[in-house]
Image (cartoon, helix red, strand yellow):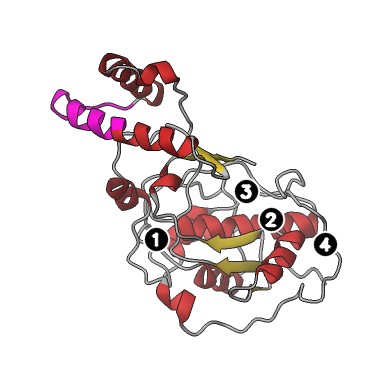
Amino acid sequence: MDTRKVILAVFSVVLVFRLADSFDYTEEDLASEERLRDLYERWRSHHTVSRSLAEKQERFNVFKENLKHIHKVNHKDRPYKLKLNSFADMTNHEFLQHYGGSKVSHYRVLRGQRQGTGSMHEDTSKLPSSVDWRKNGAVTGIKDQGKCGSCWAFSTVAAVEGINKIKTGELISLSEQELVDCDSDNHGCNGGLMEDAFNFIKQIGGLTSENTYPYRAKEEPCDSNKMNSPVVNIDGYEMVPENDENALMKAVANQPVAIAMDAGGKDLQFYSEASF
């Protein structure tokens, strides 16, 4: 039997977004106000960021403070690096409003009643020293959720894409927009839960492709015609036991895992790469 069961690990408040295109700076750019203004203008041009004349000074001040934070963190002994990206003249509060806002209570997922789903990998004894599912072809290219709180849909879809590739050998980019528009148990651009999305996919007989139902970064009426052409289905999902890193390690060794994470900190706003 071709069993396609996805794995879900829940850590904290959901936020999933693409790693924004970064923009490099040098120590010389920090030397004077004039150099900083020039850097800001080059950054605006690079990211095609338009600001009114009245707003530019305020945004420049935010940009300066964010740059100071990035520079300070990068000179500390931390396992990651930050860079100027397209969010560099936004405050952390604005960033969370635009990209992390959700009216869904994720707290019930973390501390409430959770489905007892067992673990299909709990008896695994031999694990690889490392695994990169991107190199194994089980992860599609980077996607951008835009100004829509649809992180739950992207996390759901990535897990389904991964297990389908493992089981069938075919990597198909699936439709987040179908979940945003059609999954009434979730809340579209106002947030959602991966458990409900997995159940939705199972109940309707699968998800259609990204090409058939492309992403629009906003909630629209459900297109039932597009829903009638599913290309990938799942048999169910299971939860990785809480506070069990060994169980999570076993799950990730066998397939890509859907996670929710606390992304409220300022560092993640400018996260660029791991640094080992």
Report how far apart the C-alphas of labels 4 and 3 lie in the structure: 28 Å
Residue 251 sits inside the magenta stretch: no
- Residue that appears at 41% across and 74% down: 107
- Choose the circle earlier in sequence order: 4 or 2: 4
> Mark 1 and 3 residues: CB-CB less than 8 Å, in contact?
no
Please state which of the two labelled residues, at mark 1 or mark 2, is closer to the viewer.
Answer: 2
> Residue tagged by mark 1?
188
How packed mark 3 is, by other alpha carbons closer than 10 Å (few <14, some 14-19, many 20 or more), is many
Residue that label 2 marks: 162
**Could you tell me if the residues under marks 4 and 3 are in contact, i.e. CB atoms within 8 Å?**
no
Compared across the picture, whether 22 is left or right of 259 comes to left
User: Which label is found at residue 173?
Assistant: 3
The residue wearing badge 4 is 127
| Eye-nearest disc, 4 or 3 | 4
Measured along the vertical axis of the image, is residue 125 above or below residue 22?
A: below
x 36%, y 69%: residue: 104
Label 1 crowding class (10 Å Cα cut-off): few <14, some 14-19, many 20+?
many
- Identify the residue at horizontal 37%, vertical 23% (top origin): 43
Q: Amino acid at mark 2?
A: Gly
Q: Amino acid at mark 3?
A: Ser
Magenta residues (range): 49-64
Place of residue 275 in the rendered image (x, y in percent of width and height, measured from the top left): 60, 40
User: Which of the numbered marks, if any, corresponds to residue 235?
Assistant: none
Q: Earlier in the sequence, mark 4 or mark 3?
A: 4
Distance between the Cα atoms at labels 1 and 3? 19 Å
- What amino acid type should be assigned to the residue bearing mark 1? Gly
CA gap, disc 3 and disc 2: 10 Å
Q: Is residue 156 left or right of residue 66?
A: right
Q: CA gap, disc 4 to disc 2? A: 18 Å
* Amino acid found under the numbered disc labelled 4: Leu
Image quarter hosting the C terminus:
top right
